[in-house]
Amino acid sequence: MSDLACIFRFVDAHAGTFAAIATIVIAAFTILLALSTHRLWKATKETAEAALKSAKAAEATVKTLQDSDRPYIFVRVKGGIGHITGDNFARCQCTYTLTNHGKTPALLTSVRADIWYGDAPSPFGQEAPKSYIARGGEVLNAGEDQPLLVERNTELVDAQLIYVGQKRLFCYGIIGYEDVFRVPHFTKFCWEYQHTPVKGFYASPPELNDYT
């Protein structure tokens, strides 16, 4: 019993010392906890930054692929005013050739093409007829061609005016397609037929030919 009493008296006599030691221990633990928390926060921050950098690099890679390896569809035209039909009409013909100049396939979603003639400088005031592509699309592989023939009867008097350059004849339209990433694109084209001085089709001004 006397030993226990001695212990109590010792603790009571040195209470301040023990309190100071406890304070130091708590402070040291707090510092260690703060350092550990800071290191954890720093590691988390670095991990998040690395993940963000990787995501941006992947996004840039996809964008590069979309730009460099995507399909590009352009259109060539040949034809003109053909034979006279039995009902005294001239037959206008335009053979469109769609070519995929890109590196990957294109899914054609809409092909609208028509023949137009008149006095106005542009046929785009009216919408081309319904699409020649069935619902669900049609694939045009890289480097492939797809021909499309469009015909229209023209009265002889109009054909004669086209011959002498007093009326303008256009083969025009718009192609809608998607790339392998399902990104939509379009190609708008317009070729003007001239019978003189050299018979053939010539691309109209740039504003009538556009693409995305």
Image (tube, rainbow, N blue to C red):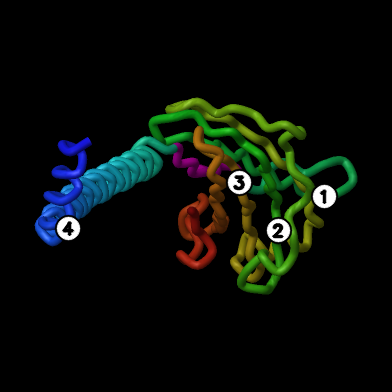
Q: Secondary structure at mark 4?
A: helix
The outermost residue toward the bottom is 120
Q: Residue 52 or 174: which is nearer the viewer?
A: 52
What's the CA distance linking mark 2 and mark 4? 100 Å
Q: Amino acid at mark 4?
A: Ala
Q: Which residue is mark 2?
A: 116
What's the CA distance linking mark 2 and mark 1? 15 Å
Q: Residue 27 or 189: which is nearer the viewer?
A: 27
For mark 2, does the 10 Å Cα neighbourhood hold few (<14), some (14 to 19), or many (20 or more) residues? Answer: some
Q: Amino acid at mark 3?
A: Ile
For mark 4, does the 10 Å Cα neighbourhood hold few (<14), some (14 to 19), or many (20 or more) residues? Answer: few
Discs 3/2, front: 3
What's the CA distance linking mark 1 and mark 3? 29 Å
Among the two numbered marks 1 and 3 on one chain, the one whose residue lies closer to the N terminus: 1
Q: Which residue is mark 3?
A: 175
Residue 31 appears anywhere in the view = no
x then y, percent, for residue 19: 17, 58
What's the CA distance linking mark 1 and mark 4? 114 Å
Marks 1 & 3, CB-CB < 8 Å contact: no
Q: Which residue is mark 1?
A: 89
Q: Tell me: 150 left or right of 155.
A: left
Q: Which residue is mark 4?
A: 19
Residue 120, quarter of picture: bottom right
Discs 1/3, front: 3
Where, quadrant-wise, is the N terminus in this rendering?
Answer: top left
